[in-house]
Each structure stands twice: as structure tokens, then as C-alpha cells.
Image (cartoon, grey):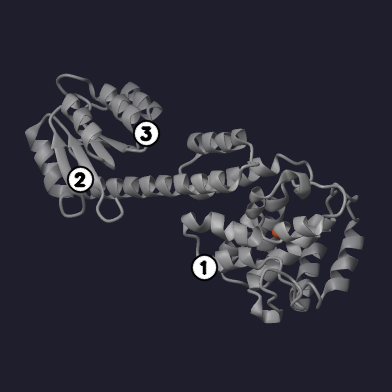
Amino acid sequence: MEDRATVLVVDDELGSRESLRFTLKPSFDVYTSEDGEQALRFIQQKPVDIVTLDLRMPGIPGIEVLKGIKKIDPDIEVIIITAYATVDSCLEAIRWGVFNYITKPFHPIDVISTIKKSVEKRRQTKTLKTFIKKIAATESHLDHRIMQFAQHKFVKSSNSQMDFVRVLVATIERRDPYTWGHSQRVSQQSFLLAERLHLSGEERAQIQLAAYLHDIGKIGLNDTYIYKRGSLTKLEWTMMKKHPEMAVELLSPLALSPSTISIIRHHHEHFDGKGYPDGLRGKEIPLGARIVGICDAYDAMISDRPYRKALSKSQSISELKRCSGLQFDPEVTGVFMEVLEDER
Ligand SMILES: [Fe+2]
């Protein structure tokens, strides 16, 4: 699947079978079956990425073949190619997780582009499963019901791995009233700050995403001290400080851009070099990380924490100003004041 995807064409008409084979051969490894029974037998014996399926065939009806395929391997993407599309058959196919529906006579370009999209979706699903395995292996404390819920919601609501990650972050935050919505707020505010700093659309998008994921490494930590009321022991603090690196490790299967990853890694660096994990100082710290760092700190200040009440907005602003040049980049702090001013 890494290089050439394998496509199985299932169609009882020799003409369409051969024309599909001819169309797809340059881009994919193509096999053909002339009925459902043969197709299901084939899939049990050989790994297949994508199936194109005719609905009206002698023997097992197309919809039943679709169900059979999904039972053997739910991640195989199925594209229906038929001359007999009805609303009912469409609905039934969607219910069984069909990727797309193409009506005959088909245009070769449509078929190729649909198959390419389905290959991409299958690749994403694989990546996601590796990611989930990685989280599950890292995290013995994380409630498996949370993972299942996030996964279930992903399957129901979307096709993109980023949507899944968002659902996962939201689900994890839901464990704790103190962090509820934190990532979302930091993400929104970081985006506004990046806009004020006239960063490009691409940079803003990277910052927004990194801000959303900045604390995902905390899922590798024990709940008891993430939400501890008193101060952390030295060992707990050492563990806590590993969360940016843990996030980078967890997110590695998702192939995010290096800039996004670097913002996540460095969101706890301080302008004076006293932060972690690498003790970067000043402009050595990626600008995105300086942006996310200040928005993260501000949101934490204005929120209740298990060990203290929320600060007021003006107290928080004084604190940011006091830490400008120490924890925060003075220029970024100045522009952030303007963003906060706009909110009033
Ligand atoms: Fe953090």
C-alpha cells in the first residue's frame, strides 16, 4: 500500500471489467473478479486496499458483497460503480461505509481520482491506528473508554485524522473541569495573536494546530499529579516537564509539519532561557512557540486551578507584563496586550 495500492474490480460484465482494468493499471495493482463470491474469496486470501463494486450481479447481490467485505476488513475502501443506482441502494451502501458512488458510464478521470482519494483515506486510517496504538502503549492510566469514545466519535463524525485528534483532545480534557476547553481557547487566541503579528496563512494554521495539541503529551502522565492540589514533588515535576517531548513522540505517526512539531516541543521555553525542554532563549525559540506560550500561560491564569482560584483579567495582565522579557517575548507580549484590549 505504501507504493502502489491494490485494487480489486468486481463486475460481471467483461466489458466494464476490462475497461476498468485498463484505466487503473498504470496507477494501481489491479485484480478482477466476475462475481461476489469470487471477490470475497479473493479478499480472504490476498490483502486488498480498494474494491470497485458493481451492484447488480448474478449470485450474491452487490450490497451483500459490500457487507461481506466490511466484515472481513472494515478498512478496505469500497467504491460502487453501477448503472442501477437507486436512492435506497445508495442509502444502504452509505450505511455500510461505502467510500463513494460512481454511475456508469463512468469517466476514467473520475474513477482514478476517486480511487486516489480512497487510497489516501485508507493511508490516514492506518496512520491513525498506529497513533492510537502508540497512545495506548504509552498510557496505562488513560481510561480505555475515553479512547473508545474518541475513536467512535471519529468514525461517526469525520474522515480526517486531525478531526480525530481534536475529538481526542476534547475527550481527554473532559476528564477534568479545570482544563475543559483550554486547548480550544489557547488555539483561538494564538491564531488571533499570530494574525496581529501579520504572519502568513500557513504559519497561522500551524500555530493554531500546534496550540490545539500543545499539551497532548500530558496523556502520558498520571492524573493524580496533573490535577494535584498541592505542589508537585521533584520527581512529579521532572515527569511533568517531559510532556512537550512526549507530545512530539506521540504525534510522530501523523507526519505533521516540522514547524508545527517544533512549536509543540518548545511551548514551555522561556525568553530568558530558563524554560524547558531545551533551555532555548530569545529568538532561538520559534515564534509560534513564543505565541502559544503566552496564550497558554494567560489562559491558565484566568482559569481556576485545583490549587488556586482564577486571577482576574487585570491581575493576569499585570503578571504577563511583569514576566515580559523573563518568561515572555516582550514584543509578543506587547501585541498580545492589543489582542486582549480588543476583547474588552
Ligand atoms: Fe504545556
Is the residue at mark 1 in contact range of ligand 1, meaning its CB lies under 8 Å from it? Answer: no
Residue at 78%, 56% in the rendered image: 299
Please tell me the numbered disc located at residue 107: 2
**What residue would you read off at disc 3?**
74
* Residue type for callout 3: Pro
Assign the C terminus to one quadrant of the image: bottom right
Dot 3 surroundings within 10 Å: few (below 14), some, or many (20 or more)?
A: some
- The CA span between labels 3 and 2 is 27 Å
Q: Position of residue 216 (x, y in %)?
A: 63, 52
Mark 2 vs mark 1: give the one in front. Answer: 1
Q: Please tell me which of labels 3 and 1 falls first in the chain.
A: 3
Q: Position of residue 119 (x, y in %)?
A: 32, 48
Please tell me the numbered disc located at residue 148: none
Residue at 66%, 43% in the rendered image: 172
Locate residue 147 relative to residue 74 in the image: left or right: right
**What residue would you read off at disc 1?**
258
For label 1, the SS is helix
Residue at 57%, 38% in the rendered image: 147
* Residue type for callout 2: His
